[in-house]
Image (cartoon, grey):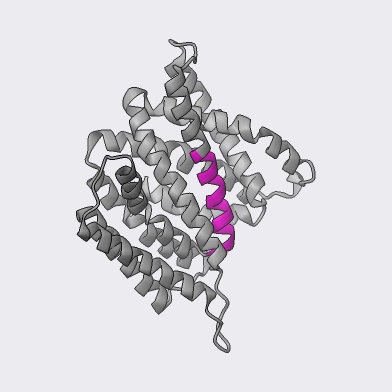
Amino acid sequence: MVLLWSANFIIGKVALREFPPLLLGALRIGLAGVFLAPAYWRKTRATGGIWPPADLRLLAFLAACNVGNQLLFLFGLHRTSVAHSALILGLGPIFVLLIAAATGLEQITMRKTAGMILALGGVAALAYQASAPLASGAAPSEATVAGDTITAAACVLFSLFAVFGKRAAQRHSTVAVNGFAYISGAALLAPVLLWKARDFSFAHVSAAGWSSLVYMALFPSVICYLIYYHALTRISASRVSAFIYLEPVIATLMGVAFLGERISTSLVAGGTVIFTGVYLTERG
């Protein structure tokens, strides 16, 4: 799961070279809905796909969070570097804690508060790096404050999906929850897809572009989500999070290897502060 999610940052950058973010997001969600539709139908055919009103409201909320997260991830990745995107998405456990505390599921201690402040300080350092003027002869960075901010918003929506999605998955299967999210999201984005596709030249998309789209729709959008929720039902959330910590590291190294991104001193410093803050928050 971690390897597939880490590669998604690189694959996303490749796909964004050929598709505009909104069209790419609509195609990704629509294709993921197609992949999940058969399994979703098998899981829900006993009820005829009719959900109780309370469950339907929760599933609709999750679908909105999923669509928003997927789109904002691409808009953010389009405007920032792989390293910045991966590190900011690493703030997920903090947003999960805040959401859980707001709903009465967790309590925020002084140590957790200190960890959150430290992690947000690391994000501020990354934002400062993205907005700082270039030194003479320095290579421009892909990272921007706007891209980092959009990525943070995507992280909030993913955290909402994770918290309330786990609650829904306890009453229904992970296939049903994710299937509803992607299938309804695909239906919601159908007008957007038709609008953006009208003036887009699909004939000029390369094999790498199409392969990237299929990868993003199948692996990060479907398989990784199913593994994630399956893991939460088998091992503790802290152990799952321990694996998630590897994602920014792996994604950053992939960005260096495949996209030629640079690892600067300020990036390492900001990432270290973020990791430390998130660790303190989870162990507080």
In the picture, which quadrant includes the N terminus?
top left
Residue 224 visible here = no
Whole-percent x, y for residue 66 in the image: 49, 39
Q: Main secondary structure of the magenta part?
A: helix
Residue at position x 52%, y 37% in the image: 64
In percent of width and height, residue 150 lies at 53, 56
At 42% from the left edge and 39% from the top edge, which residue is drawn?
161
**Does the segment drawn in magenta span residue 197?**
no
Is 260 left, or right, of 160 in this rendering? right
User: What is the quadrant of residue 113 in the picture?
Assistant: bottom left
In the rendered structure, the answer to whether residue 56 lies left or right of residue 92 reads right
Q: Quadrant of the C terminus?
A: bottom left
Q: Residue most toward the bottom? A: 136
Residue at image x 58%, y 54%? Answer: 75
Q: Which residues are magenta?
A: 65-80
Q: Is residue 283 above or below residue 132?
A: above
Q: How many marks?
A: 0
Q: Is residue 80 above or below residue 162?
A: below
Would residue 154 be found to the left or right of residue 87 on screen? right
- Return the residue nearer the eye: 279 or 259: 279
Vertical placement of residue 169 versus 110, above or below: above
Residue occupying image coordinates x 20% and y 55%: 283
Most extreme residue toward the right is: 199
Give percent across and percent down for residue 54: 43, 22
Q: Position of residue 190 (x, y in %)?
A: 67, 33
Relative height, residue 117 to residue 183 (above, below): below
Q: Is residue 221 visible?
A: yes
